[in-house]
Amino acid sequence: MKLRSLYVENQPQLMIIPMIDIIFFLLVFFMMSTLYMVEQHTIPVNLPQASAVRQDKPSSINITVLADGNIMFNQEEIPLPLLAKRVRLEIDKQPDNIFVLRGDQQVPYGQVITVLDELKQAGAHKVSVAVEKER
């Protein structure tokens, strides 16, 4: 009669394919969760709506015309005569800057065009106008 050995003949095997699946799942989870952590620092205004909307790139400079007519260069209030000088300084630093013009819905059309004209005279070639998507 043959007695069985107390030593286990079959060693446990390490299955690597389920571990790879779990690693890819975690990778996708962390990639998707970091996409929602990006915070945009802009001044809140009521933007007009449009059906064709294109999002601006992260390397953009926001120029906001508030409802009371004040002009904000990113987070800093700036008078209209100094806007062209400030834009030229930014273009000298980085010529590929994108300027995003954000005008409140209550601002007269002529004032937004005046700001746009200042941008063009200062040499800003990449200017976009921010709007909200129509619902």
Image (tube, helix red, strand yellow):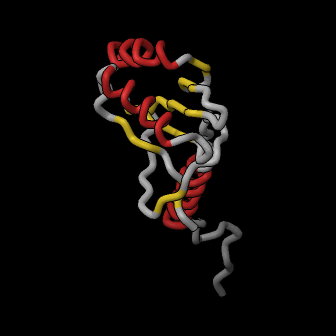
Q: Name the residue: 29% across, 22% down.
A: 123
* Residue 40: % across, % down: 60, 38
The residue shown at (47%, 37%) is 110
Report the residue at 39% width, 24% height from top.
118
The answer to whether residue 76 is above or below residue 26 is above
- Tell me the quadrant of the picture where the N terminus can be found: bottom right
Image location (x, y in percent) of residue 45: 64, 42
Nearest the eye: 102 or 58: 102
Instruction: From this view, report whether residue 13 is shown above or below residue 80.
Output: below
- Front residue of 95/129: it is 129
Q: How many marks?
A: 0
Residue 17 lies, in percent from the top left, at 49, 66
Please state the horizontal and vertical placement of residue 72, each as a whole percent of the image.
Answer: 58, 26
Q: In this view, does 90 lie to the left or right of 10?
A: left
Side (left or right) of 111 relative to 10: left
Camera sees residue 73: yes
In the rendered image, the quadrant that contains the C terminus is bottom right
The outermost residue toward the bottom is 1
Picture layout, residue 91 above or below residue 45? above
Confirm whether residue 59 shows in the render: no
Q: Nearer the viewer, residue 14 or 134?
A: 134
